[in-house]
Amino acid sequence: MTERTIDVVVFDIGGVLLDWSPDYLYADLIPDEQERTRFLTEVTTRDWNHQLDAGRPWEEAIAELTALHPQHTEWIEAYDTGWLKMVRGVFEDTVELVTELRELGIPTYALTNFSADKWEVAKEAFPILTGFDGEIVSGVEETVKPGEKIYRILLERYGLDAARTFYTDDVQHNVDGARAVGLDAELFTDAASLRKHLRDRGLPLK
């Protein structure tokens, strides 16, 4: 049997456990694909969403954007009020893997760029998110991946050994950020590949 080199497994959430995309909400609100793409890239920009992940109050962020783009007020407000419709569901293969790890007694943690308010909404909607041994949420900590600080918070708060802590994320620069502080990290592509990564590190998975 392969020697076990990790003690805990840390998961990113969006793109790993939750199938999240603003397109799922806005496909109905803005049927024209070009117009929808323009709105999601030029109005509700990546940087704007990143501010929400970093703890900016939703009310403030929505108010600023509607003042700048009053013609799109309804669509902008939907980003908040219709947020849950951006989540199509969970990735069942990843849920099965998380469940198996927990049944084996292997601690699982969440490390996610997520607004504090919407994290609570997501946990209520998707019970798999409530069973982690610990969680680090960017909106609560007011710092985001891939900055070093959020990974340090994870390690220090839960007393984890970086070298024996495995982390997976669907964004390469977040994986790179984890590796920079000494975590054993791999890019998430699918649950089957993740399962192999964990087996290769000695975890007794099916």
Image: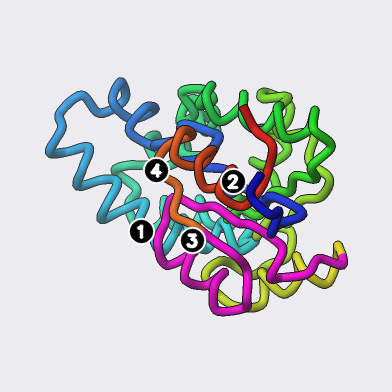
| Amino acid type of the residue tagged 4 in the rendering | Thr
Instruction: Kindly check if marks 1 and 2 are in contact, taking CB atoms under 8 A apart as contact.
Output: no
Instruction: Report helix, strand or loop for mark 4.
Output: loop
Which of disc 3 and disc 2 is earlier in sequence? 3
Residue drawn at the location 49% of the way across and 64% of the way down: 174
What segment is highlighted magenta in the picture?
159-185
Q: Which mark is residue 50?
A: 3
Q: Disc 1 to disc 2, how far (Cα)? A: 47 Å
State the residue in front, 102 or 156.
102
Instruction: Report helix, strand or loop for mark 1.
Output: helix
Neighbour tally class for label 2: few under 14, some 14-19, many 20 plus, Cα within 10 Å: some
Q: Disc 4 to disc 3, how far (Cα)? A: 22 Å
Which of disc 1 and disc 3 is earlier in sequence? 3
Instruction: Kindly check if marks 2 and 4 are in contact, taking CB atoms under 8 A apart as contact.
Output: no
State the residue in front, 114 or 56.
114
| Amino acid type of the residue tagged 2 in the rendering | Leu
Instruction: Kindly check if marks 4 and 3 are in contact, taking CB atoms under 8 A apart as contact.
Output: no
Q: Which mark is residue 197?
A: none
From the viewer's perspective, is the residue at label 2 or at label 4 nearer?
2
From what the image shows, is residue 192 above or below residue 201? Answer: above
- What residue does disc 1 label? 68
Which of disc 3 and disc 4 is earlier in sequence? 3
Q: Check the picture and name the quadrant holding the N terminus.
A: top right
Which of disc 2 and disc 1 is earlier in sequence? 1
Q: Which mark is residue 198?
A: 2
Neighbour tally class for label 1: few under 14, some 14-19, many 20 plus, Cα within 10 Å: few
Horizontal relation, residue 16 to residue 71: left or right: right
Residue drawn at the location 47% of the way across and 70% of the way down: 176
Q: Report x, y in % for residue 182.
A: 62, 76
State the residue in front, 106 or 172.
106
Neighbour tally class for label 4: few under 14, some 14-19, many 20 plus, Cα within 10 Å: some
State the residue in front, 173 or 21.
173
